[in-house]
Structure formats: structure tokens, C-alpha cells
Image (cartoon, rainbow, N blue to C red):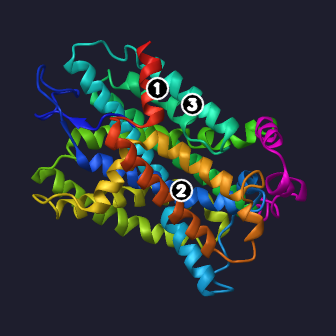
Amino acid sequence: MTETTRPAVPPAAGGGTAPGEAPRRLPLLDVLRGVAILGTLMTNVWIFAAPGAEWSVLTGGAALPPVFTDPSAAHLAEAAFRLAADGKFLALLTLLFGVGLAIQFDAARRRGEPWPGRYPRRALFLFAEGLAHFVLVFAWDVLMGYAVVSLLVAWLLTRTAAARHRVGRWAGIAHLTLISLLTLALLTAPGATGGGPSERVIALYADGGYPEQIAFRLENALALRLEPVLSFGLLLFLFLLGVRLYRAGAFAPDAAGRLLRRRLMRWGLGTGIPLTLLTGPACEDLFFLGRYVAAPVVALGYLGLIGVLLDRRTGRAPGALAVSLSAVGRTALSCYVAQNVLCALACYGVGLGLATRLADHGPWWVMGLWAAVCALLVAGARLWLRYFRHGPLESAQRRVLRR
């Protein structure tokens, strides 16, 4: 959600570029960010469509379909769709946010400005945006968690690379320990997730008013804000990994970058896909391992795969798909909020109420909703960028921070 620029020369020791060097845009970052935004919706759309919507995540109402006991075409399609996305694109988005911080740090050094300088103001504004998004639109907002972690990583960018590596390593170890303990708790206490949301909560999203939904989020804010707390170690690890990959040239259009992307593709997909299959449909109690351990590994594979596909078009004009994804990536913040607003209006009773009307029509309408929202976002982003340089929310953020 920042300018995707990179130094024209390799970063100096500790990050940054030589003074006076002009940055150049990295098209891969825009495409990756667009993929991450639309991919995150692949997970969130099922939350909007589930009975009880946002609350269903905590009560088991949004579990995967029973593909082993009932391997119907609908169940297999839904499981494949959700397993391809759950946690993967969120991890990719988190990693790219770390890349954005590294880019901002380099830009500040290039201009001779102190760091973090005014970045805490940007983080505070992002937190306020996330808070408004949580209260008014979607309980599972990620912006608030990003804002908090970004402050720590912004400070770590002033430390040595070795210090960042140590922090990242310990953050990863702490995260794996916590997830292992949570998984052990689920395995030793099966069925603890409950049998789905209550009838009152289901009715709230199916027929309740908008003020009542806001009040429900506020009343249950501690439970609904639990994910960024549980995943703090993972967020910190992925932010720092994004910085490290950027410094290593993983997004650069040169031979070293292409080699690194091929390695990420092979390692991430070769390791992450088997882990996903083992921890996804096989056992619901392995949910934490699937979403918070296997998914980040697959995200690295996705990063490499998308990079490899774009590398094959080197020297040629970008295709329509790459241009569309890039447009979404350049307006990432606006598209992230807009997709959740659109899904809420489509699924909840305050809007079209499709979650109730189409509840008996299987998963196909949910996939269709995802495709329709993606098409609207792509069309809107491309049209907007014809006349403006930044997305609407991005422009508002820049105007407020300039003042």
C-alpha cells in the first residue's frame, strides 16, 4: 500500500540506496499486491456467506465441508477453493507490507530524512482506518494489527540486519510454540469450538439492523480482535521476512531475482501444499497449523510462482490480467475496504440478504459472488487510475498526513 519503487543500485549495507539515485518502479510488487487483495477475499467471502457471518469463525460455523464423508462435486469445489486461499494470501499481504516499510525506509534515506521520522503518524492513521473498518464494516480487519507491528518493524529497520534476523527468528519460534500449544489443546479437547453460532446471532446478520451489528462488534471486540494478538509473532516474522527478501533482490527484474523467485516457488509449493493437505480437510482440530504454519509457506510459493509467470513475459508488454492485478495493487487499501463493503451489502439483511436467500444453493453462488466483486474492483481500479494517481483512500490518507 506504498509506492513500489526500488533503488537503481543494490542497497547499501544496512538497507537504503546511494544518495541521489533515482528509484524505479517494480511492477511485480503491484501485481503481487493485487493478487493478495483479491485472494484475501477468497477467504473472507465465505465468512460473509456463512450463517452468523463474522461470529461463525469463532463457533465452527465456517468449517470446511466434509469431503471425506460426502465427496460431492460441490463439497470438493468448495474445499479446493478455500484451501487454496485460507491464510495464504493474508500471509502474502503481510509479507508485502514489510516490503513496503523497507521501501519507505530507503526513500527516507535517499532524501536525507530521519527515520522513523513521521512514520508513527502514518501508522496511527492506519490504525484509525482499521478501527473504523472493524466497527463499521468487517470484524476481521487486518489493518489495526499491521499498524501496531509496523511501528516495531520501523524501529528495527534502524538496527543491523543481524539484529533483525535474531528478532525474526525468535518471533517465528514463539509463534510455532503458541500454535503447537493451541493445536494440542484442540486435539485433547475435541469439539471445543462449539456447534455454530446461536439463532440470535444468525438472525442479527440475516434480519437485524446495521446499528445492531455495530453494537454486536463493539460488545464482542475482545473476541473478534483475538487473531492479531494470537498471530503477533507471525506478523512480525513475515514483516521482517518481507524486508529480508526485498534486500536480497527477490522482486528485482534481474537474473538473481529470477533465480530467487524460482527457488521460492519450488520450496514454498513443494513443502506448503502437502502441509496444507495434511492439516486442512484431514482434521478440523489441525486448523491452527493449516492457517498459521502451512499457509505462510504456500504464500512464499505463490510469490515465486507469480514472479516466474511474469518473468516469462520479460521484454513484452504486460497482458490484460497483469494490468488488472496491478491496478488493484496500486489501490490496495481502497480495494480491501471496498470488497468487504460490497460483500456485506450483498450478503447481510441490511442489503440484498443473499446469504439467507441462497443458503440452499450450495457453494456456487459464493464463488460467483467472489468473481463478481473481483470484476467490480478491477473495473473500478482501472477506471480510477485513468484520472488519478492514487486510490481514493490512499489519496485521503496522503492529504491528511500532509496537513
Q: Name the element at disc 1.
A: helix
Among the two numbered marks 2 and 3 on one chain, the one whose residue lies closer to the N terminus:
2
Q: Which residues are magenta?
A: 189-218
Amino acid bearing label 3: Glu
Mark 3 or mark 1, whichever is nearer to me: 1
Relative to residue 141, is residue 302 depicted above or below? below
Closer to us: 323 or 5: 323
The circle drawn on residue 129 is 3
Relative to residue 64, is residue 181 depicted above or below? above
Amino acid bearing label 2: Leu
Identify which residue is drawn at 67% across, 52% down. Answer: 345
**Is residue 88 shown to the viewer in this render?**
no
Classify residue 304 as left or right of residue 329.
Answer: left
Mark 2 or mark 1, whichever is nearer to me: 1
Identify which residue is drawn at 31% across, 47% down. Answer: 30
Amino acid bearing label 1: Gln
Is 77 contained in the magenta span?
A: no
Q: Is disc 3 surrounded by few (<14), some (14 to 19) or many (20+) residues within 10 Å?
A: some
The circle drawn on residue 57 is none
Location of residue 20 by image quarter: top left
Q: Name the element at disc 2.
A: helix
Location of residue 284 by image quarter: bottom right
Closer to us: 283 or 221: 221
Question: Residues under labels 2 and 1: Cα distance?
Answer: 23 Å
Relative to residue 163, is residue 168 depicted above or below? below
Is 216 contained in the magenta span?
A: yes
Question: Residues under labels 2 and 3: Cα distance?
Answer: 19 Å
Identify which residue is drawn at 40% across, 37% down. Answer: 1
Provide residue 287's location: percent of width, then percent of height.
62, 61
- Residue, disc 1: 397
